[in-house]
Image (spheres, helix red, strand yellow):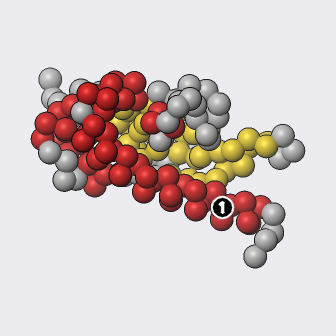
Amino acid sequence: MKTLEPLIAEHPFFKGLEKPYLELITGCASNAVFKTGDFLFREGEVADYFYVIREGTIKLELFTGARGPITIETIGAGEIVGYSWLFPPYRWVFSGRAATPLRLLMFDGACLRGKCENDHNLGYELMKRFSHIMMERLQATRLQLLDLYHVH
């Protein structure tokens, strides 16, 4: 059986991680497929995964009572989706829906949290990498809200 480690190791998000860390992370990884329109996760539900998009696009949505779902950002191949698995209470901040058919690497957040607890250096490496993604998503949300409310 072919391991996912080479795929993970070559991804820019994981570049520079030491081999033992890549092995630990690979132990929490699997392949996943979603059809167009499928939800990967829903706002408020338990956040127990993050994803590396291999093929396709995901719409990050925020639900508003008055307007229904608002697309905050569309995320494509090569990008990372999901950071809510890192922070208690481990609930999704946005919903993620397949805008096209998807092929993903799916990482079990509970598995990774356990490995990070056992090795704080691994946890620090992942936090540094995810903090960058969080800042990008925060900026995208800010710009979307400015546009939504016609503030320029």
User: For the point 26% across and 27% down, which residue is it?
Assistant: 118
Q: Indicate left or right for 53 with 91 as reference.
A: left
User: For the point 42% across and 57% down, which residue is it?
Assistant: 132
User: For the point 44% across and 31% down, which residue is it?
Assistant: 49
Q: In this view of the protein, which residue sits in the foreground, 17 or 104?
A: 17
Q: Is residue 118 visible?
A: yes
Residue 31 in picture, x, y percent from top left: 33, 30
Q: Is residue 97 visible?
A: no
Quadrant of res 124: top left
Per the image, the residue denoted by label 1 is 142
Q: In this view of the protein, which residue sits in the foreground, 89 or 81?
A: 89
Mark 1 surroundings: few (<14), some (14-19) or many (≥20) residues within 10 A: few
Q: Tell me the kind of residue under disc 1.
A: Arg
Q: Secondary structure at mark 1?
A: helix
Q: Indicate left or right for 145 with 54 as reference.
A: right
Residue 84 in picture, x, y percent from top left: 51, 37
Residue 138 in picture, x, y percent from top left: 58, 56
Residue 105 in picture, x, y percent from top left: 35, 36
